[in-house]
Structures are given as C-alpha cells and as structure tokens.
Image: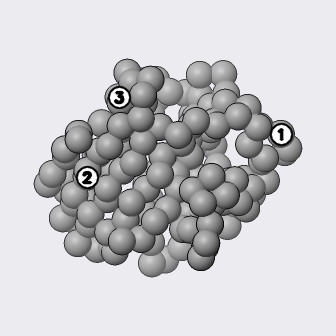
Amino acid sequence: MLQTTLCYIEKDNQYLMLHRISKKQDVNRDKWIGVGGKFEPGEAPEECLLREVKEETGLTLLSYQFRGVLTFCCDKAEPEYIFLYTADRFAGTLTDCDEGELTWVDKDALYDLNLWEGDKIMFRLLAERETPFSLKLCYQGDALVEAKEL
C-alpha cells in the first residue's frame, strides 16, 4: 500500500484547497483536494507532511493535528493509506503549485466543488470529531462503492 499525507490548512473558516489540473495522468485530475503527497523512504508521517506542504504551498506549518487515516481504494490507482491532518497556524507566503491551483475556500462552499464523494464524509467527520478516525473509501472510476467508518 502506498503511504501518503493529506493536509487541510485552515484560516478564517476556510480550507486551502488544491484544484488538481496540471498533471495529465492523475487519479485526482479536476478534483479539489488538500495538499500532501507520498512518503519518501524512512520518513515519518509528520516529516512527510511538513515537507509536502512546504513543497506545494511555500508555507511552513507551525501547528497541525493528526485527524485520522483514510484507506483509499480505486480501480484507477494503487491503494493507499492517507495520514490525514489539519493545520491552523503557518508561516510564509503562499506560492504557486505545479500540481494545480491553490485557493482558499469557505468551508460552507466545499460541497459546491468537484470533490471525491467520500471527501464529503471526511469533511463531516472533521467537523464532528475531535478524536482521530479511520475511514475506508473504495471507488470504481469516480463512483463511491464502499464507505466504511471504522
């Protein structure tokens, strides 16, 4: 299983969202997601988180919280464990991202975006739960065929 991090950076009741439009071969193509990426050999989840956020946004996280693990299964991609974080303090200036467009989006407007269907469940859990959670999401194409909160 691939191991990745995913972070939703918060500011003024908004999340920093990445509209994935740059890569031609991308399971997330045209979707809106948080920032993060693949572990490098020997990296701890937090090391991956900090590195990926810095690479994709130019920001240095000053305060972040582990929120849970997503198990992502899709017939179009390698299955992965996604270590999920939120962050509420950062330093630096937002830079361009080579994977797409970064935009601050009101939390109330998230569901208007082209999201993975399971992300709607994840956002609900992020809003409702203080403690870490585990969520399994399986897709055939873009269709959610299994969602299981564990």
- Its colouring scheme is one colour
Q: Which residue is mark 1?
A: 91
Label 2 environment density (alpha carbons within 10 Å; few <14, some 14–19, many ≥20):
many
Q: Earlier in the sequence, mark 3 or mark 2?
A: 3
Which mark is drawn over residue 76? none
> Disc 1 to disc 2, how far (Cα)?
33 Å
Which mark is drawn over residue 124? 3
Identify the residue at image location x=79%, y=53%.
58
Tell me if residue 12 comes above or below residue 7 in the rendering.
above
- x and y percentages locating residue 108 in the rendered image: 46, 23
Identity of the amino acid at label 1? Ala
Q: Is residue 128 left or right of residue 52?
A: left
- Judged from the image, the secondary structure of the residue bearing numbered disc 2 is strand
- Judged from the image, the secondary structure of the residue bearing numbered disc 1 is strand
- Judged from the image, the secondary structure of the residue bearing numbered disc 3 is helix
Image quadrant for the N terminus? Answer: bottom left
Identify the residue at image location x=84%, y=45%.
93
Tell me if residue 132 comes above or below residue 99 in the rendering.
above
Identify the residue at image location x=26%, y=50%.
136
Q: Which residue is mark 2?
A: 137
Q: Earlier in the sequence, mark 1 or mark 2?
A: 1
Evaluate if marks 3 and 1 touch, with contact meaning CB atoms under 8 Å apart.
no
